[in-house]
Amino acid sequence: DAGITQSPRHKVTETGTPVTLRCHQTENHRYMYWYRQDPGHGLRLIHYSYGVKDTDKGEVSDGYSVSRSKTEDFLLTLESATSSQTSVYFCAITDRGTDTQYFGPGTRLTVL
Amino acid sequence: AQSVTQLDSHVSVSEGTPVLLRCNYSSSYSPSLFWYVQHPNKGLQLLLKYTSAATLVKGINGFEAEFKKSETSFHLTKPSAHMSDAAEYFCVVSGSSNTGKLIFGQGTTLQVKP
């Protein structure tokens, strides 16, 4: 599992509330990613990071922000959650040694 | 731009029969290609990857895939399906930069009937 944990694993919240999801890795990987998974769409990239304080947008970044103040943690924030953000969120890292991306266990978010 | 299309959203096979999950890709350069599997309510697990070495790639659990540049395909096969193979499978292509970004297909759900 490449030492990736996500918290919380499940969350139910209401429209308009802020939500922060955390991804933690233990192996000092430089690249980290946030994806969302929705039926019929596979996984779509929200944001990614290529180092501390270095982040960039992915395919579906509207309504999301990220922060990376230390190598091991990559935070995804929904400033004001909407029902369209109900999804399963996966964090991932790239192991540059094998050029392979590994995924965390996922966070199921429901916005009512 | 890179893209990937999984040609079947749902495939159903009987246990012990061959599995074929189809994937076509589009890329302006020689891509890296991957197959990931996701069992129900689980995370994603790498099955195999192609990175311009041998065109026939062997993965875990008896799966393999063949890279065919002329057909821009990377189909996943297994000679004999097992009940435990029932899952969702994603064909994935690497993005154009060196940032490690991946582009996912829509997924194929494999059903294995007893």
Image (cartoon, grey):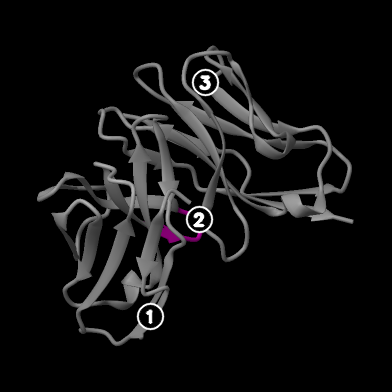
User: Is residue A32 highlighted in magenta?
Assistant: no
Question: Disc 2 and disc 1: Cα gap in Å?
Answer: 22 Å
Please determine if labels 2 and 1 lie on a single subunit.
Answer: yes
Determine the secondary structure under disc 1.
strand
> Crowding at label 2, few (<14), some or many (≥20) Cα neighbours within 10 Å?
few
Please determine if labels 3 and 2 lie on a single subunit.
Answer: no
**Where, by quadrant of the figure, is residue A5 drawn?**
bottom left
Question: Disc 3 and disc 2: Cα gap in Å?
Answer: 22 Å
Query: What residue did someone put label 3 on?
Result: B72
Determine the secondary structure under disc 3.
loop
- Of discs 2 and 1, which sits in the foreground? 1
Query: What residue did someone put label 2 on?
Result: A40
Q: Amino acid at mark 3?
A: Thr
Residue A39 placement (x, y as % from top left): 50, 60
- Against B74, residue A46 (above or below) is below
Residue A43 placement (x, y as % from top left): 42, 52
Q: Label 1 marks which chain's residue?
A: A
- Against A28, residue B32 (above or below) is above
**Where, by quadrant of the figure, is residue A110 drawn?**
bottom left
- Against B26, residue A71 (above or below) is below
Q: Amino acid at mark 1?
A: Lys
Residue at image location 18% in from the left, 77% down from the top: A80
Determine the secondary structure under disc 2.
loop
Query: What residue did someone put label 1 on?
Result: A11
**For this rendering, which residue is in front, B51 or B74?**
B51
- Against A79, residue B114 (above or below) is above
- Labels 1 and 3 touching (C-beta < 8 A): no
Q: Quadrant of the C terminus of chain A?
A: bottom left
The residue range painted magenta reads: A36-41
Left or right of B7, for residue B1: left
Residue at image location 37% in from the left, 50% down from the top: A92
